[in-house]
Image: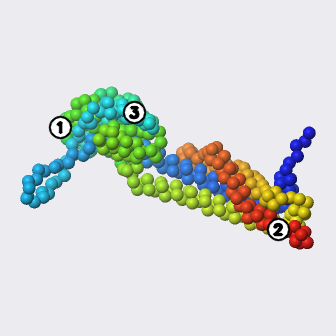
Amino acid sequence: MRMRLPLEWIAALRFLGQGRVQTSFIIAGAAIGVAVIAFMSALLAGIQANTIRRSLLSQAHIVVRPAEEIARPLRLAGTEEATVQKRTQRVVSIDQWRKLRDEIRRMPGVSVASATVSGSAFAIRGEASKSVLLTGIEPEEYMRVVPVADKITSGSARLASTDVLVGSELAHDLGLRAGDKLRLVAPSGATAVLSVTGIFDLGSRGVNERNVYVALRTAQDLLDLPGGASRIEVTLDDIWEAEKVSRAIAAQASLQADSWIRTNEQFFLALRAQTIANYAIRFSVGVAVALGIASVLVVSVVQRSREIGILRAMGASRRQVMGIFLIQGGLVGLAGSFLGTFAASLLLAIWRSGIRNADGTPLFPVTLDPTFMAWAALAATVVGTGAAITAARRAANLDPVVAIRG
């Protein structure tokens, strides 16, 4: 037994089929709108992800350090307020840092927490010397925060107590190669002669010129911080939760916790502006598509007023007549969404094959999220249906006799 479609569906499909050229144009317009939204969204998301990845490659999402030391002079009653110079900050250890590190690791959303010792030093080779940022690390944990091992251009990422990793710019300035010796001198006068086991390139000239990595115990000896840790560096599952998690850490431990959002405020504002621009593009194109669908369906009501009058005279209710045009709008939006996502996929494939780095590698990864495609299809269907409301109400309000006389 064949299942019969409701009157609304039969009429809607027949109207769409009778005006094939008109239907093709309206579906093409919806498809172009969906393609633009999908392509631009994927492109902007890829640019944003690449920018964040490159910018945060050499830093943790949250850095926990001891609170700043503040000089508080004693004041006697009746004396004038003293002018106090801000004291120089020393390298001090976080109290009970092992316990705190383990507690941070157990916090929701935290991926990695690694203790480090960081301070200034001089890198000396022969008569040449450079001021550097000396960082003592727990290699296995820290390299999950900053992927130094993946950025080694010469040598290896091995880091024993007698080893040091240096940036490519610093290696160039001091004439270093893997296997050479480098002397590090701390402000206190402590000295260590270490073997350069690896040279890294983290994509930032400043980082490559200034940063050197040694084992945690080596940095503790050089910076006169036996058994201590001056910072805990944290990586999160969701980088946008950094400010929330940093506030939770600071409240729990009474320490200074700086998120990448706070330390890179201008960069974060630029990302927000980019996201807002993406939403504005989506909204503008969506409105244009909705107006296009609405205008064509209103014209369709005028063209088919006689058919609508006949349907009403045969007993079709106002609700059924409205349903005919709402179904048309929904079908047009749905068809446009499928064609649009296919076109967006094709455009992205062309982009990936044509826009590449000089070495032939992709400029940055750009993909069309299947979840976004599903939402785009749903949104286009809803927009198409919503755009048909005006036409549907106009059709439902037609007087059958007047419509038939035409």
Whether residue 13 can be seen here: no
To which residue does mark 1 refer? 189
Give the quadrant of the N terminus. Answer: top right
To which residue does mark 3 refer? 105
Query: Residue 138, image x and y in percent?
Result: 35, 31
What amino acid type is highlighted by mark number 2?
Answer: Leu
Which quarter of the figure has residue 236? top left
* Colouring convention used in this rendered image of the protein: rainbow
To which residue does mark 2 refer? 398
What amino acid type is highlighted by mark number 1?
Answer: Gly
Q: Are marks 2 and 3 in contact (CB under 8 Å)?
A: no
Rendered residue at 19%/52% (across/down)? 86
Q: Along the polypeptide, which appears first: circle 1 or circle 3?
A: 3
Depth order, front residue of 242/228: 242
Query: Residue 338, image x and y in percent?
Result: 72, 50
Q: Along the polypeptide, which appears first: circle 2 or circle 3?
A: 3
What amino acid type is highlighted by mark number 3?
Answer: Arg
Nearer the camera: disc 1 or disc 3: 3
Q: Along the polypeptide, which appears first: circle 2 or circle 1?
A: 1
Q: Secondary structure at mark 3?
A: helix
Depth order, front residue of 374/116: 374
Nearer the camera: disc 2 or disc 1: 2
Give the quadrant of the C terminus. Answer: bottom right
Query: Residue 23, image x and y in percent?
Result: 80, 59
Rendered residue at 22%/36% (across/down)? 223
